[in-house]
Every structure is written in structure tokens, then in C-alpha cells.
């Protein structure tokens, strides 16, 4: 039995374990996580473009679990919130007083016909998996002439900017290596717009025009014929109508969804996500259950930046509930997406539930900047490993207030 049980050893789980250790003592906190390694996934965009090494993105799980906190190295197989316990794949039953669900999002390459086995062929990669991110860089280097295709699936995804970041980086790489005139760059997205926040969408549309990129909306990747280098897309506006495009390079963003264990559990909403209050992160039906990050139904973009902001709110929520008080601090939906538009440029998108910009810095963040690239490539990983995972970073709200003193 644990006072606080955390499910998941990703960014949300480790961050909350660190925060809860300070509240109730390390011996009263446990983390359930089967993986041996913890990855800082936001850097994989740069790994896929050859700008960072994959090895820099991972650390042993044992090194990020807060000292003294119990690491239960197992997979969760069942949640039983009515009895305040969970079951694991090694037939353990673990009970809790408070439960924090941080199980992340599940990738479904298998929902695309021909994958994941197609990754055994060259010229295809995906920045979303540790197994396939280096294949993106290989495909980029091996590119000779033809179509470079980048996809976006017909499901919720984590880091919704990443599928197009690798397109901008690839375009820059082709320019740098003298191959740009041989490349026809295509972004086929299931969505109906390039980005959900108008201010940043306008800036991206300008880049798409300038760099002569082709964007096709409402196009969903349904099949990859890797042996023939062909990708099949369905037109979502005319279901059943498909188009086959041959590729010289293909970057796949897989369909994603809630983890299987959550879909059938009592804590899930109809779509399978953890059903939490969007302001307090407390479960809507079980008051001693909480959710954070990609596995929740919070109506904001699923990013590590969102997890940082959520962790500060959830910390306050749980503190007050432990004292039988009502949670007061409200999550505004803050999330951030550093849109990498080249090897030394980033547009730093930051926004809230209303899809309104919520910017930290006192300058126009819809402009491409070197300073924001340095922040994405070097400052953020440092902040992640050294502050966020130790429970000391709750997002930039304090900085935002400082920078905007006397300006609002």
C-alpha cells in the first residue's frame, strides 16, 4: 500500500513522483513503469534531422526515479478505482490512497497497412519512436530525387507540430546539400489547417509559400508499400477515394490513442482517455484519482511543456485535497510547441485552451528566431533533466509575468 501511487515513468509520472515525495515522504510514493530507459522525446525532431545524437535523449530509468521512491518494474494491467487498487502483469495487487495516472499515449503504426514491418526497408522513418528516428536521418541523407512526403494521422497526437518540423528541417537539409531542386516536398495532413492557432498558422503559411512546399489537407495515410516506395492516402472529404504517391523519402506520424489498459477501465471517458476536470486535473468521478499529460482528455495540445504547467497545478490540487480543502488553482490549458523551421530557427508557439497565444517573452514569437532555436535545442533539455523531472519547473508562467510587467 502506498499513500501516492504513480502510474507511468514518463515526464508526467517522474515529475509528479518528485513533487509527491516532498509532500508525503519518499517511502510513501511508488512509480509503476516497465521500461528500463527514460527518453526526452522532444529532441527526437532534431535527431531525425541529424542535428542531435539519439544517445543524448535517453537515461536509465533508475537515474530519474526520485531517490527513495519505490520503482515497481511492471506493467499496469487493470485499474480498480472502486477498490483503490491496481493490478500489474506480475500478478501483484497494489493499493493506494491517491492515484496519479500518467500513462502517456500509445503509438499505432500497425493501423497503417504495411507497418511497422515496412520500416525494414530504406527511405522511410518516423521521429516518434526510438526504433525509427535514426531511419529518418538515414532517409534524408540517402535522398536523391523525387517526392519527400510527410504525414499527419487522423487521430489525436503528441506534439502536433513535430510532423511538420521535420519537413522544414528536411527542406533546409536539401538546400544545404544542393538537392533542393530535385525534391518535391509534400505535407499530407488529415487536418483541415496547418496549425490550430491563427497567429502561428499565418507565419507557417508564409514559410510554406516562400519555400515552395506542397500542403494537402484531409489526406490520411492508410497504407505503405515500402518495397515499391509507395504511400496510399485516403481523402477524408470523400471516404473511400484513395491516391497512391511514390516517394523517395517518407516520414510517418503514426495514428495514436489512449493506452489499452485505460480504454476499458472505469477512469476513462467514452474515447478512452482519463476523464479529468480541465482546471484541477482531478478525476470527474473518483476524487482520489488524478491525471496528467498525454493520457488525459484535457482539451489542449499534448506536449512536455503542457505537462510542466499541469504538474504545478496538480501539485496544488493534491495538497489541498489532502487537507480536505477545495482545489483553487486552475490550469489554463497552457501548452507550447517550438516550431523548428530550420537548423537554427524556431517559432515558439505558446497558447491556452482558447487557442489564444499565451507568450512568455515580450517580443513577437511568431517570428523565426535563433534565440528560440538555442532554447529548444540546448536550454530545454537541461531544464527538463535538471529541474522539471526533479519537480522544480511548473512552466514559464512566473517568467511571463516578470517579462510583461507594466506591459499588459
Image: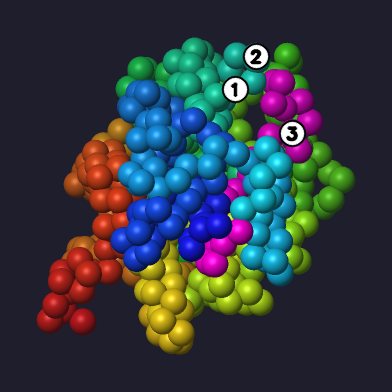
Q: In whole angstroms, how far apart are the C-alphas of marks 2 and 3? A: 16 Å
Residue 145: x and y, percent? Answer: 54, 16
Q: Viewer-nearest of labels 2 and 3? A: 3
Q: Residue beneath label 2, please? A: 121
- Could you tell me which quadrant the C terminus lies in? bottom left
Q: Nearer the viewer, residue 238 or 352?
A: 352
Which residue is most to the right? Answer: 240
| Residue picked out by circle 1 | 124
The CA distance from mark 2 to mark 1 is 7 Å
Of 371 and 1, the residue lying toward us: 1
Residue at the spot 55% in from the left edge and 24% down from the top edge: 131
Q: To which residue does mark 3 refer?
A: 110
Element type at mark 1 = strand
**Residue stretch in magenta:** 95-118
Do tag 2 and tag 3 residues touch (Cβ < 8 Å)?
no
| For residue 245, above or below residue 300 | above
Q: Is residue 160 visible?
A: no
Q: Say which label, 2 or 3, has the lower sequence index.
A: 3
Inspect this view and state whether residue 229 appears. Answer: yes
Q: Determine the residue positioned at 34% across, 65% down.
A: 23
Q: Is residue 272 left or right of residue 67?
A: right
Amino acid at each position: 500500500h502506498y499513500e501516492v501511487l504513480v502510474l507511468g515513468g514518463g515526464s508526467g509520472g517522474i515529475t509528479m513522483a518528485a513533487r509527491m515525495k516532498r509532500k508525503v515522504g519518499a517511502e510513501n510514493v511508488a512509480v509503476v513503469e516497465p521500461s528500463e530507459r527514460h527518453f526526452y522525446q522532444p529532441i527526437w525532431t532534431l535527431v531525425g534531422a541529424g542535428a542531435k545524437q539519439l544517445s543524448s535523449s535517453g537515461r536509465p530509468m533508475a537515474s530519474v526515479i526520485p531517490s527513495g521512491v519505490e520503482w515497481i518494474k511492471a506493467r499496469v494491467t487493470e485499474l480498480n478505482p472502486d477498490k483503490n487498487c491496481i493490478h500489474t502483469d506480475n500478478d501483484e495487487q497494489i493499493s493506494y490512497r491517491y492515484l496519479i495516472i500518467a500513462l502517456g499515449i500509445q503509438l499505432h503504426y500497425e493501423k497503417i497497412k504495411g507497418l511497422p514491418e515496412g520500416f525494414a526497408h530504406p527511405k522511410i522513418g518516423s521521429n516518434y519512436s526510438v526504433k525509427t528516428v535514426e531511419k529518418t536521418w538515414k532517409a534524408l541523407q540517402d535522398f536523391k530525387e523525387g517526392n519527400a512526403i510527410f504525414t499527419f494521422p487522423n487521430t489525436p497526437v503528441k506534439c502536433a507540430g513535430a510532423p511538420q518540423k521535420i519537413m522544414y528541417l528536411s527542406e533546409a537539409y536539401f538546400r544545404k546539400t544542393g538537392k533542393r531542386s530535385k525534391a518535391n516536398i509534400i505535407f499530407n495532413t488529415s487536418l483541415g489547417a496547418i496549425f490550430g492557432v491563427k497567429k502561428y498558422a499565418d507565419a507557417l503559411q508564409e514559410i510554406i509559400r516562400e519555400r515552395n512546399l506542397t500542403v494537402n489537407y484531409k489526406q490520411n495515410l492508410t497504407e505503405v508499400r515500402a518495397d515499391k516506395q509507395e504511400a496510399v492516402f485516403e481523402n477524408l472529404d470523400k471516404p473511400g477515394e484513395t491516391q497512391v504517391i511514390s516517394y523517395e523519402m517518407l516520414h510517418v506520424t503514426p495514428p495514436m490513442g489512449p493506452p489499452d489498459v485505460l480504454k476499458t477501465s472505469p477512469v476513462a471517458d467514452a474515447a478512452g482517455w482519463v476523464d479529468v476536470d480541465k482546471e484541477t486535473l482531478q478525476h470527474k468521478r473518483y476524487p482520489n484519482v488524478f491525471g496528467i499529460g498525454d493520457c488525459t482528455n484535457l482539451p489542449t495540445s499534448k506536449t512536455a511543456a503542457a505537462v510542466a504547467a499541469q504538474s504545478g497545478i496538480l501539485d496544488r490540487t493534491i495538497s489541498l485535497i489532502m487537507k480536505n480543502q477545495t482545489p483553487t488553482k486552475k490550469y489554463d490549458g497552457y501548452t507550447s510547441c517550438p516550431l523548428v523551421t530550420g537548423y537554427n530557427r524556431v517559432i515558439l508557439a505558446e497558447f491556452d485552451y482558447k487557442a489564444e497565444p499565451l507568450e512568455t517573452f515580450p517580443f513577437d514569437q511568431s517570428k523565426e528566431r535563433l534565440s528560440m532555436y538555442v532554447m529548444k535545442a540546448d536550454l530545454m533539455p537541461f531544464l527538463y533533466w535538471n529541474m522539471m523531472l526533479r519537480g522544480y519547473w511548473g512552466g514559464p508562467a512566473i517568467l511571463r509575468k516578470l517579462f510583461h510587467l507594466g506591459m499588459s
